[in-house]
Image (spheres, grey):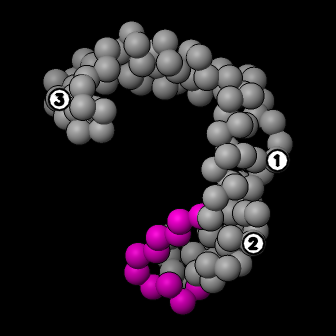
Amino acid sequence: APSANIGSLASVLVEELAAMGSKPFAADEVSRAKNQLMTSLHMNLESSSILFEDIGRQVATYGKRIDPDELCKQIKAVTPEKLSAVAQRMLKSPPTVVVHGDITAVPRYDLIAKNLS
């Protein structure tokens, strides 16, 4: 975003993050997101470069490759209630804020943290 708009962008992001912990996730939106994620996962397996990048990322992150069927099983297990619980748990800890570039329009850390608590 242009540096002049970064304050507005930060405010919108903070509002959306705070809302994640306070209002329930819509079941139809969660279902749609899960279907989109699983479709993307399977489509990416058709490209060898993306497949090898994914294998490298999984080995670096988990120390092993997770079978696509197992990933889909884990994705299917996600519920709106589980998402809400994760969001609430995340919002209980102080936020980490990283900014690169012109930071003159970025809200101060204490204001961001206050709006997330």
Q: Earlier in the sequence, mark 2 or mark 1?
A: 1
Tell me what residue is drawn at x 24 percent, y 26 percent: 64
The residue under label 3 is: 52
55 versus 104 height, above or below:
above
Residue 34 included in the magenta stretch of the image: no
Give the quarter of the image for residue 76: top right
Q: Give the camera-side residue of 59 and 42.
A: 59
Which dot marks residue 100? none
Q: Can see residue 8?
A: no
Q: Classify mark 3: helix, strand or loop.
A: helix
Q: Position of residue 34 (x, y in %)?
A: 57, 23
Tell me what residue is drawn at x 65 percent, y 39 percent: 86
Amino acid of disc 2: Lys
Tell me what residue is drawn at x 42 percent, y 18 percent: 71
The residue under label 1 is: 22
Amino acid of disc 1: Ser
The residue under label 2 is: 114
